[in-house]
Image (cartoon, rainbow, N blue to C red):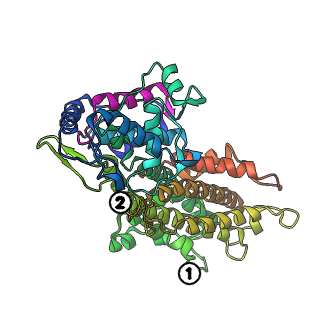
């Protein structure tokens, strides 16, 4: 399937499809005239006598050095090769594809001054599965994601490394095997390719997409935990949440009410329950998870705007013939969005961990057996699974500390304030992996607790969620090697099957 992207109006849903699938990606052909118009402006400037940054001058601190027209191609090639200074592990292929698609969207706005051939090669690389090897470390998020994007551009000129047909090879060899021809970069084209926030934005979007699935799963696991400990549904009354007015809180409360509707377990203790109020991890679930939902959506709006933005420098205004030097490459909005996502992930995990702790503690779980094992003492049950959630919760709390507040001068103090968006966004992958395990373990504990309430049963939607979980993680009767179960339970979060099985309707 070929996905057509419309520069300036691409949606989060479209970008998630790019990230999750491996189909071809093309720009709307209607973008071509604007791209070619800006390229003509740059070509004219390159032949003129007036110095224009990045077109007939050096870069950064070397912007005062004039470059002769006959050296333009060498200037752009040298720029790419000299900036390939990335280190560390290779970015995963799905996020490389998304980064390339984001670069297409930016160039497709017609303000970067590149020829259509540049866009066409990126499209062809995506279609044929030629994916540059992108080291994940080396960007400070201004002046754009220089090093990561240089590794992408290097493959386009026949240098660097790429993967093709499951193998890693020289970039030129990958293009040749795919039947593609490297480009010779014209004026400004190298600068347009490496200036921009597409690496940081792609990593932040990955964190958003994974985080949203975790948030959906958290709504289901929280409802399961509520029934497991025979918690009250009174705090879900819509009047409470309407009076506060936060949309995420209202939505989560309503979703939990629907998930718990029809639970025999819930109806069994409406009368005669001596408990007046549940702990906050049960009673305040809509307030906490709902606030995280609002934060994720807010970050999503920022990232959607950034995905459609032109973030290189200088920018070409084809209508007036102006070439304007600015600072759209500074990734501060992405850094802020990444920090917001990190806070949401940490808090979803923090309250989920407390629900796990509640369920394994016989003094708080309302008569569930210690550590949810039928034979405590001989068996330890889910004792250490709960400890694992505590370890991951604490790790995520540390990772949630802001990255956007850090800065350091670079490039001989020309780039004296930077966003740190790149590693701020990258750390979200580690956080979502941790959170998925926390929620997977919560699902295991809650399912075990609900089964202990037999012959009472939970609601239909939660029974469906449990059936999906039990298809891969059996009930725990005797102690067994739990690591594979935890991994499979986490997959029920990451593949959205837990939330889907419960029929949860909640979209980003």
Asked which quadrant contains residue 241, the reply is: bottom left
Q: Residues within 10 Å of mark 2 (few under 14, many from 20)?
A: some
Task: Assign a secondary structure to mark 1.
Answer: loop
Is residue 251 something one can see in this rendering?
no
Disc 2/disc 1 C-alpha distance (Å): 45 Å
Which mark sits nearer the N-terminus, 2 or 1? 1
Task: Assign a secondary structure to mark 2.
Answer: helix
Is residue 150 found inside the magenta-colored segment of the image? no
Is residue 366 something one can see in this rendering?
yes
Q: How crowded is mark 1: few (under 14 residues within 10 Å), some or many (20 or more)?
A: few
Numbered badge on residue 153: none
Magenta-colored span:
110-131
Lateral position of residue 19 relative to residue 397, left or right: left
Percent coordinates x, y for residue 82 in the rendering = 46, 44
Residue under label 1: 276
Numbered badge on residue 333: 2
Q: Is residue 72 above or below residue 404?
A: above
């Amino acid at each position: 399937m070929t996905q057509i992207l419309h520069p300036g109006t691409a949606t989060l849903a479209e970008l998630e499809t790019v990230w999750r699938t491996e189909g071809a990606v093309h720009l709307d052909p209607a973008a071509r005239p604007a791209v070619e118009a800006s390229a003509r402006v740059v070509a004219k400037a390159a032949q003129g006598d007036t110095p224009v940054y990045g077109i007939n001058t050096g870069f950064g601190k070397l912007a005062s050095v004039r470059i002769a027209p006959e050296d333009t191609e060498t200037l752009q090639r040298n720029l790419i090769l000299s900036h390939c200074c990335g280190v560390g592990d290779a970015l995963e292929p799905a996020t490389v594809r998304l980064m390339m698609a984001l670069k297409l969207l930016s160039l497709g706005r017609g303000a970067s001054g590149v020829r259509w051939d540049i866009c066409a090669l990126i499209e062809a690389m995506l279609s044929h599965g030629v994916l540059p090897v992108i080291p994940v470390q080396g960007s400070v998020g201004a002046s754009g994601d220089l090093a990561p994007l240089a590794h992408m551009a290097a493959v386009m000129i026949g240098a660097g490394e790429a993967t093709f047909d499951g193998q890693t090879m020289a970039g030129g060899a990958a293009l040749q095997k795919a039947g593609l021809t490297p480009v010779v970069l014209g004026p400004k084209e190298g600068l347009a390719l490496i200036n921009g926030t597409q690496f940081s934005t792609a990593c932040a979007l990955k964190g958003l997409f994974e985080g949203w699935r975790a948030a959906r799963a958290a709504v289901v696991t929280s409802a399961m935990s509520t029934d497991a400990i025979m918690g009250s549904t009174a705090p879900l009354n819509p009047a409470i949440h309407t009076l506060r007015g936060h949309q995420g809180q209202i939505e989560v409360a309503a979703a939990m009410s629907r998930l718990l509707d029809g639970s025999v377990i819930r109806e069994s203790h409406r009368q005669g329950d001596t408990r007046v109020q549940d702990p906050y991890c049960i009673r305040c679930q809509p307030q906490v998870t709902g606030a995280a939902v609002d934060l994720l959506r807010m970050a999503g709006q920022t990232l959607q705007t950034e995905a459609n933005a032109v973030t290189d420098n200088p920018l070409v205004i084809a209508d007036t013939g102006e070439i304007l030097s600015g600072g759209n490459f500074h990734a501060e909005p992405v850094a802020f969005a990444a920090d917001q996502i990190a806070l949401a992930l940490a808090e979803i995990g923090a309250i989920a961990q407390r629900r796990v702790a509640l369920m394994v503690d016989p003094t708080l779980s309302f008569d569930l057996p210690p550590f949810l094992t039928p034979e405590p003492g001989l068996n330890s049950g889910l004792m250490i699974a709960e400890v694992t959630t505590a370890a991951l919760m604490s790790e995520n709390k540390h990772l949630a500390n802001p990255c956007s507040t850090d800065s350091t001068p670079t490039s001989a103090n020309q780039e004296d304030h930077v966003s740190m968006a790149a590693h701020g966004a990258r750390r979200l992958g580690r956080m979502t992996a941790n959170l998925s395990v926390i929620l997977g373990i919560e699902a295991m504990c809650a399912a075990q607790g609900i089964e202990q309430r037999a012959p009472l049963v939970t609601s239909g939607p939660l029974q469906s969620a449990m059936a999906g979980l039990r298809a891969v993680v059996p009930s725990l009767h005797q102690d067994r090697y739990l690591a594979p179960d935890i991994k499979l339970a986490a997959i029920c979060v990451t593949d959205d099957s837990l939330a889907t099985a419960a029929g949860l309707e909640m979209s980003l």
